Amino acid sequence: MKHLSEQKNRTLKILISITILLTAVLACGSAVSPEFAFQTSKITKTSVWCRLLIMPQIGGDSIAMPKYIRPYCVGKSHAQFSTIEGCMELSAPDKDDAYDMRHHCIDALAHRHLNPELCSHIKELNYDPHSSAVDLYQDRCRAWSISREEQCLTGFLTEGWREGVAEDCFEYLAINHQDHSICQRIKDEQKRSYCLESVDRNGNTLY
């Protein structure tokens, strides 16, 4: 009888310990904000803090789910201290998460170095190479990494570049260089004003 009572006590203690551990993990996940995780991952040169984002993030009237926040944070932070090879090696148990991490890392790395050529590696991700989405992703990546005005005029590898992204070339240049004066080249007053706002907005973002 005494042995049975001791066994019940041990079981109860184990259950209590597990409950406390789970509570601590959930509290940690909810307490870590994307901004804190991103900055800490950059400083420590490890994406572990971004991987702790396990709880939904509430901001204003919207809720951001961890499935989308975590890969974004991992990819963006990893690009701050890694190389294109490092981006391509990012992994996760979920294949979609792994793809998103690598994609975001390539985007951020190309923007960091203002090197659109890095965007071509998006073709090498685990994605259908014949999908039109690949061209779209490449164009978006190049748009955020252009550094010279002539790049907008000559275009890059995809057909959609000239028709779509080139129209907002000066805005991309201004944001990438954090230079308000480039916005003054935009003739349309409303677009010029939006360009100035975009430079300020992107200059203050942690991402």
Image (cartoon, rainbow, N blue to C red):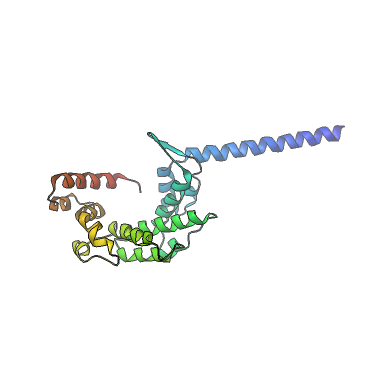
Towards the viewer: 8 or 67 = 67
User: Is residue 76 placed above or below 148 in the rendered structure?
Assistant: above
Q: Split into 4 quadrants, where in the image is the N terminus?
A: top right
Q: How many marks?
A: 0
The image shows residue 10 at horizontal and vertical percentages of 76, 37
Towards the viewer: 83 or 163 = 163
Query: Could you tell whether 176 is left or right of 83 in the image?
Result: left
Q: At 47% from the left edge and 41% from the top edge, which residue is drawn?
A: 32
Residue reaching furthest to the left: 187
Towards the viewer: 180 or 123 = 123
The image shows residue 62 at horizontal and vertical percentages of 40, 37
- Where residue 137 sits, quadrant-wise, is bottom left
Query: Could you tell whether 133 is left or right of 93 in the image?
Result: left
User: Is residue 131 placed above or below 55 in the rendered structure?
Assistant: below
Query: Could you tell whether 191 is left or right of 83 in the image?
Result: left
- Where residue 8 sits, quadrant-wise, is top right
Q: At 42% from the left edge and 44% from the top edge, which residue is drawn?
A: 34
- Where residue 144 sits, quadrant-wise, is bottom left
The image shows residue 11 at horizontal and vertical percentages of 75, 37
